[in-house]
Amino acid sequence: MAAKDELGRRGEDAATAFLTRQGWTVLARNWRCPGGELDIVAVDGAELVVVEVKTRTSDRFGHPFEAVDARKRARLWRLGLAWCAAHPEHARGRRMRVDAVSLLGTDPFTLEHLRDLR
């Protein structure tokens, strides 16, 4: 596995652990469809949450959240709706939102969580 992929996997593991400690239920990781991939799909209270995870060793090339631009957010919403269509038993009656988790450094990471991206 390439170092970049290993860093990304470790970041997703750390984000999943963080969300679980917050009381969330993780329903899916690395869900794929023809339109792309969702890093994490989880339930936070009554809401279904699509979580984009961005992991970097440093902010030398910009903060990880800078990669979650308007185009990426629109794609996450489309993929989230595709996930809901594929899993109506989990989506029915729930509001969906898109969050992002940034991890900087190496273990231990500095973690930031942005909620309800539009």
Image (cartoon, grey):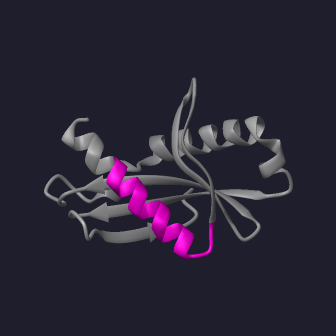
Horizontal side, residue 56 vs residue 70: left or right: left
- 42, above or below 85, in the image: below
* Residue 100 colored in magenta in the image: no
- Residue with the most extreme bottom position: 22
Which secondary structure type mostly characterizes the magenta part of the structure? helix
Q: Quadrant of residue 116?
A: bottom right
- Residue with the most extreme top position: 34
Q: Quadrant of the N terminus?
A: top left
At 38% across and 70% down in the image, what residue appears? 112
The picture places residue 102, in percent across and down from the top left corner, at: 36, 62
For the image, the number of numbered tags is 0
* Residue 16 colored in magenta in the image: yes
At 53% across and 75% down in the image, what residue appears? 21
Horizontal side, residue 63 vs residue 26: left or right: left
Q: Quadrant of the C terminus?
A: bottom right
**Can residue 64 be seen?**
yes
**Can residue 114 be seen?**
no
The picture places residue 109, in percent across and down from the top left corner, at: 28, 68
User: Viewer-proximal residue, 96 or 83?
Assistant: 83
Which stretch appears magenta? 9-24
User: Viewer-proximal residue, 62 or 11?
Assistant: 11
At 62% across and 74% down in the image, what residue appears? 23
